[in-house]
Amino acid sequence: MVARRSLKGDYCPSARSLDAIGDWWSLLIVRDAFDGLRRFSDFQKSLGIAKNILTERLRTLVDRGILETVPVGEAKARVEYQLTAMGRDLFPVMVALRQFGERHLFQPGEEHSLLVEKETGLPVKLDIRTQDGRPIEADETVLIKVPED
Amino acid sequence: MVARRSLKGDYCPSARSLDAIGDWWSLLIVRDAFDGLRRFSDFQKSLGIAKNILTERLRTLVDRGILETVPVGEAKARVEYQLTAMGRDLFPVMVALRQFGERHLFQPGEEHSLLVEKETGLPVKLDIRTQDGRPIEADETVLIKVPED
DNA sequence: CGATTTGGTTTCATAATGCAACCAAAATCT
DNA sequence: AGATTTTGGTTGCATTATGAAACCAAATCG
């Protein structure tokens, strides 16, 4: 394949994000981490991912600061994986993907999962707003370039 | 590689979304489409993607209803690609990815692009709220299962 | 009308991924 | 304690996905 190009140096923040978590499995691992999974075997069972690939993905997610290992029990040999603060900041990405899926990728009445507020049980909303709080659409926005200092 | 598993049947909306747009190039193509790119050669120049892969990705994005082709000029042979209504609904995903990147993947003072409101030039915000408008964090939410009717 | 650009397709080499077998350390059972 | 099972991987091999480059027909340009 000649090694796919890294986007780490791209000036577009979306591109860099995809570089960090945009491969096939990484976001699914992060989703499971948000669901509370912590052990190698948990991820493996949940995703049906090959073990060598899971090993590699967990390693790079740790390298990139999205997951961290915590020793389990007395021994330092066995670890669990949990989201870092940076990893938890992927929450809006997960919610955005979820809402797109809910809206467009399910038949009406089809069984699916739903993200709700713990306290009230009501579905959460995600929206894009201006600084003064007015909801805004894509065509009312534009991309500008912020030069280096 | 033995053909990676499709998530089209997964009950998790995030998983289905990733199935639709979660490969290496698709979201970058969608990002460029939001930036106004429409021609094969535009995407090719912007992304540096191999032409055969671009062909395949454009085709599946059209198949999945995220892009649509519009004939250009008189001839039906030449087409441009534009986002469908469904495709435009990926806007929050793009913004969420962008904001994560801005926050975590750039050095302070490093050059980057920024999404702003056309009218005011002010950066847009994205946040997750309860039904009554209170901003909410991941740990105040929980996933429930919505059974089929 | 001839040359160039656009929008691909085909071929080939290589990297990424999956599967299955294997293994050491930890945990559990007797 | 010793035997057995589970956990958390690693290794080797087969296959798929991807990229690069060559090629090509139709549209466009001069």
Image: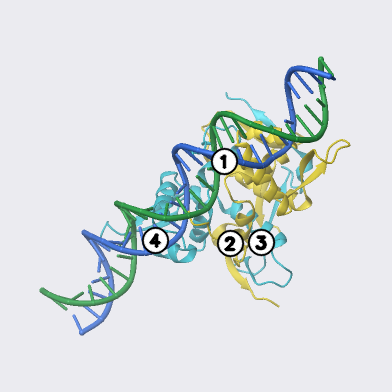
Chain colours: A cyan, B yellow, C blue, D green
Badge 3 is on which residue?
Answer: A124
Residue A118 vs residue A64, the one in the foreground: A64
Residue type beneath disc 3: Val
Instruction: Report the Cα–Cα distance between label 4 and label 1.
Output: 27 Å
Instruction: Identify the disc placed on residue A121.
Output: none
Q: Residue A46: image x %, image y %?
A: 48, 65
Residue A3 vs residue A81, the one in the foreground: A3
Residue for point 70% across, 58% down: B133
Cβ–Cβ under 8 Å for marks 1 and 3 = no
Q: Is residue B134 visible?
A: no
Tell me which chain the residue with mark 2 is part of: B
Please tell me whether residue B116 is drawn above or below residue C4 in the rendered image.
below
**Structural crowding at the residue carrying mark 3, measured as other residues with C-alpha within 10 Å and reported as few (<14), some (14–19) or many (≥20):** many
Q: Is residue B80 left or right of residue B18?
A: right
Please tell me whether residue A88 is drawn above or below residue B34 in the rendered image.
below
Badge 4 is on which residue?
Answer: A40
Badge 1 is on which residue?
Answer: B101
Q: Quadrant of residue A118?
A: bottom right
Tell me which chain the residue with mark 3 is part of: A
Instruction: Report the Cα–Cα distance between label 4 and label 2.
Output: 21 Å
Which element type, helix, strand or loop, lies under badge 1? helix
Tell me which chain the residue with mark 4 is part of: A
Instruction: Report the Cα–Cα distance between label 1 and label 3.
Output: 23 Å
Q: Of marks 3 and 4, which one's residue comes earlier in the chain?
A: 4
Circle 3 or circle 4, nearest the eye: 4
Badge 2 is on which residue?
Answer: B7
Residue for point 61% across, 52% down: A92
Circle 2 or circle 1, nearest the eye: 2
Q: Residue A12: image x %, image y %?
A: 61, 35
Q: Of all residues shown, which one is farthest toward the right? A: B74
Q: Residue D20: image x %, image y %?
A: 54, 31
Which element type, helix, strand or loop, lies under badge 2? loop
